[in-house]
Amino acid sequence: MEELIKSENNTIVDVRSAGEFAGGHVVGSLNIPLNEVPNRIEDFKKMNGEIILCCASGNRSGQAMMFLRQNGFDNVHNGGGWMDVNYYKSL
């Protein structure tokens, strides 16, 4: 997972609420709250490389990953909590 996170060719998507995202997030990540994921399929199709999902703990990003995989995405990964993703990004 660390290599996926560190790659500049991949996209990090934070599925927390806009308010949570505003309180801190991985630099360069996109914010698509979990409840918006089903309506943003076209946005996900346009993303570069592998898609690393994150949230506060990994629960919501896991739900988003399962939804996207059920809808044909094989390039999505659950990065877990955004602070962990941020740590790996900064290495």
Image: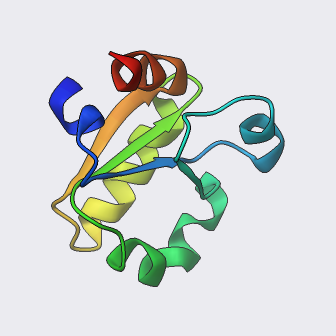
Q: In this view, which residue lies farthest toward the right?
A: 19
Q: Residue at x 34, y 19 (%)?
A: 88
Q: Residue at x 72, y 40 (%)?
A: 21
Q: Residue at x 21, y 73 (%)?
A: 72
Residue 1 visible, this angle = no
Q: Quadrant of the C terminus?
A: top left
Say if 24 sits above or below 70 in the image.
Answer: above
Quarter of the image for residue 67 reads bottom left
- The x and y percentages for residue 49 are 22, 61
- The x and y percentages for residue 51 are 31, 54
Q: Residue at x 74, y 46 (%)?
A: 17
- The x and y percentages for residue 13 are 48, 50
Task: Decide which of 8, 82 is in the foreground and name it.
Answer: 8
Q: Quadrant of the N terminus?
A: top left
Judge left or right: residue 3 versus residue 83: left
Say if 51 sits above or below 46 in the image.
Answer: above
Residue 63 visible, this angle = yes
Task: Decide which of 34, 32 is in the foreground and name it.
Answer: 32
